[in-house]
């Protein structure tokens, strides 16, 4: 295969394209250089935006109809025969309908299959709970061999898709649906798989976010600085597995207050992954998780749902103010131990 | 070319030996899926000792034919064949099912040489085999993919997702076998969940369908060669078989889906198998 360097990339405008549209375009670039790449979907070529790939490489697209179990089984067989399948479908179907195929056929065999899970969280809000997926982070991070990425926006989606090709083994990339606001201005901010992006180095409190919550956390941080004079560290924890333990522990040490925000059930998601790291460190800190409070999601436009579940800027501002006043026990000598 | 009388005689001898190996491993393992391993033994013998183009000393040879044991609980039978073919030392099978052995009841393709797909959960293998067949076509390779399904396994909806897609994609290098031994854990297939008319179902999904006696090497050979010659559609060979075939006290007994035997019973089993020698 031909190594593609950053300079040859087309740069796509993440302000006018959805995450999935960017995925389709980046995949085209990758496929130019790597003849192993094929794209699979289950009657969602349009919804998962691989149309541009289909136009360019019609013989490299396999649409299996509405049959997600078969979709992932075929991908496993293709990977076993030397291809590099990118499989796109809605996250609800990738994570639940076809979970056993993802687990047994792909992860257990440790195959090079990249899963592009669109419509994550409540991003297809109006469609109702059947088409939401607020469980997939918990599900996917429990699968051995799986790498799990939740990009903040379109720029990060491009980086994640490119990184997945260089990373052997199964990768699950969770995208939204529509025109979620973009946080980054371009794709050149030092994305590295498994390393959180530190958006601000501040020290009063840390907000750890993934997906669309990164944009809202950054907005909340600006507002809190302007209105309250509070300095909020924001970490874009795009890779949830393997998680960046170093960035988490540094945040615990330097800010001692951690708020996790995600478009997901608070059970088992980003917040739980962060809590695992903190608990194992033995360090005390004030800690809170924001997301869906272990319930099925309401119907509505995504922005209304983000507001309802405190995933948006105003919600995060309120949670930060609350967490700043929470008492906690800190070890007297903990700085020495780090 | 049809199998000659001499070739058939050799395959019959090999199948008897392999059945005896399966009995031995069942003793070592403390229990195994002996019934379904014995029922598919003749088809596996025909494949591995005549039709499959594989290299036991180079299991990852990219151009090899593929074999996916979708009825993964037949791992006992498959591992005996692979050991005999030289993929690994037969002595390793003495640890079948034991702590940290690479050999569990359902074989792990990342641990056992010669296993093209890890299987065990039913209804997964045909999709993976289809992916391999499509992978061959995409890479302009001529190797063929074979997949062994259980008949009870055909209750799984995912089998039919794969069946529909294989015919849609005209995957004519894909050949499926259904080990039609008429039994599953809870009883007869037709009592638990009717499969018939099974051949009509596969035909309706666009497959070329062949029905044979799955213990008759002449018919097995003719069917495999018929599948190889078929263009534009995948082929399914529905093999009428007997669960526990070759061991008189196991034949057509639901209870021998999975069982354990001691060395005394193993002696009787092997005597029964060899008693069938002509």
Image (tube, coloured by chain):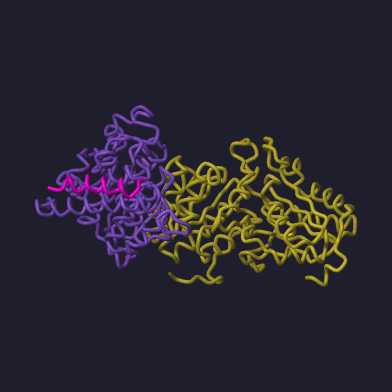
Chain colours: A yellow, B purple
Measured as percent of width and height from the top left, residue A156 is found at 63, 60
Measured as percent of width and height from the top left, residue A119 is found at 59, 45
Q: Residue furthest left?
A: B5
Q: Does the magenta stretch include residue A20?
A: no
Measured as percent of width and height from the top left, residue B4 is found at 10, 52
Q: Characterize the magenta stretch by its predominant secondary structure.
A: helix
Callout count: 0
- The residue range painted magenta reads B261-278
Point 55% across, 46% down: residue: A95
Q: Which of A116 and A278 is in front in this view?
A: A278
Quadrant for residue B66, please give it.
bottom left
Q: Which residue lies furthest to the top in this view?
A: B191
Is residue B110 visible from the viewing direction of this image? Answer: yes
Q: Does the magenta stretch include residue B275?
A: yes
Q: Is residue A336 left or right of residue A122?
A: right
Point 41% across, 37% down: residue: B156
Measured as percent of width and height from the top left, residue B100 is found at 47, 59
Quick check: A35 above or below A45? below
Q: Nearer the viewer, residue A97 or A192?
A: A97
Q: Is residue A268 left or right of residue A216?
A: left
Is residue A61 visible from the viewing direction of this image? Answer: no
Quick check: A209 above or below B197? below
């Amino acid at each position: 295969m031909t190594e593609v360097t950053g300079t040859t990339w087309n740069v796509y405008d993440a302000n006018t394209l959805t995450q999935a549209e960017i995925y389709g375009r980046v995949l085209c670039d990758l496929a130019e250089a790597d003849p192993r790449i094929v794209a699979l979907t289950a009657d969602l070529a349009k919804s998962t935006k691989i149309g541009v790939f289909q136009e360019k490489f019609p013989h490299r697209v396999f649409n299996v109809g509405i049959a997600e179990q078969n979709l992932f089984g075929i991908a496993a067989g293709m990977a076993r025969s030397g291809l590099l399948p990118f499989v796109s479908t809605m996250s609800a179907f990738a994570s639940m309908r076809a979970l056993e195929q993802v687990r047994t056929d792909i992860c257990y065999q440790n195959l090079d299959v990249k899963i592009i899970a669109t419509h994550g969280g409540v991003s297809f809000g109006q469609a109702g709970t059947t088409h939401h997926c607020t469980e997939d982070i918990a599900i996917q991070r429990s699968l051995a061999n799986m790498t799990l990425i939740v990009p903040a926006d379109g720029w990060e989606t491009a980086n994640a898709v490119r990184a997945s090709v260089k990373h052997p083994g199964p990768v699950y990339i969770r995208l939204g649906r529509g025109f979620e606001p973009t946080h980054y201005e371009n794709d050149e901010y030092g994305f590295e798989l498994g390393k959180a992006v530190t958006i601000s180095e501040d020290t009063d409190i840390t907000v750890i976010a993934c997906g669309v919550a990164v944009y809202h956390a950054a907005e909340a941080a600006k507002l809190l600085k302007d209105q309250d004079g509070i300095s909020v560290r924001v970490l874009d924890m795009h890779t949830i597995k393997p998680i960046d333990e170093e960035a988490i522990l540094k945040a615990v040490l330097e800010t001692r207050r951690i708020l996790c925000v995600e478009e997901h059930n608070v059970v088992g998601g980003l917040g739980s992954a962060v809590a695992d790291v903190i608990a194992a460190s033995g360090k005390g800190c004030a800690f809170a998780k924001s997301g869906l409070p272990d319930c099925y999601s309401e119907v509505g436009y995504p922005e209304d749902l983000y507001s309802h579940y405190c995933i948006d800027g105003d919600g995060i501002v309120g949670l930060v103010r609350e967490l700043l006043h929470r008492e906690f026990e800190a070890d007297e000598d903990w700085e020495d131990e780090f | 070319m049809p199998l000659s009388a001499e070739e058939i005689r050799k395959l019959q001898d090999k199948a008897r030996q392999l059945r005896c190996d399966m009995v031995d491993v069942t003793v070592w393992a403390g229990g195994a899926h002996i019934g379904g391993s014995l029922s598919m033994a003749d088809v596996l013998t025909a494949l591995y000792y005549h039709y499959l183009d594989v290299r036991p000393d180079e299991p990852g040879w990219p151009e090899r034919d593929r074999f996916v044991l979708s009825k993964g609980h037949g791992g006992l039978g498959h591992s005996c064949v692979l050991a005999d073919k030289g993929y690994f030392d037969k002595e390793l099978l003495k640890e079948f099912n034991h702590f940290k052995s690479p050999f569990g009841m359902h074989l792990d393709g990342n641990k056992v040489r010669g296993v093209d797909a890890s299987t065990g959960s039913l209804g997964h293998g045909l999709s993976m085999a289809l992916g391999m067949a499509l992978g061959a076509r995409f890479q302009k390779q001529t190797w063929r993919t074979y997949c062994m399904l259980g008949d009870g396994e055909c209750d799984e909806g995912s089998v039919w997702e794969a069946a529909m897609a294989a015919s849609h994609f005209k995957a004519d290098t894909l050949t499926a076998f259904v080990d039609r031994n008429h039994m599953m854990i809870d009883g007869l297939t037709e009592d638990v969940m009717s499969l018939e008319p099974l051949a009509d179902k596969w035909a309706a999904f666009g497959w070329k369908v062949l029905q044979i006696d799955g213990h008759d090497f002449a018919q097995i050979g003719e069917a495999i060669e018929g599948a190889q010659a078929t263009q534009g559609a995948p082929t399914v060979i529905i093999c009428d078989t007997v669960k526990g075939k070759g061991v008189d006290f196991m034949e057509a007994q639901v209870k021998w889906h999975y069982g354990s035997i001691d060395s005394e019973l193993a002696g009787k089993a092997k005597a029964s198998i060899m008693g069938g020698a002509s």
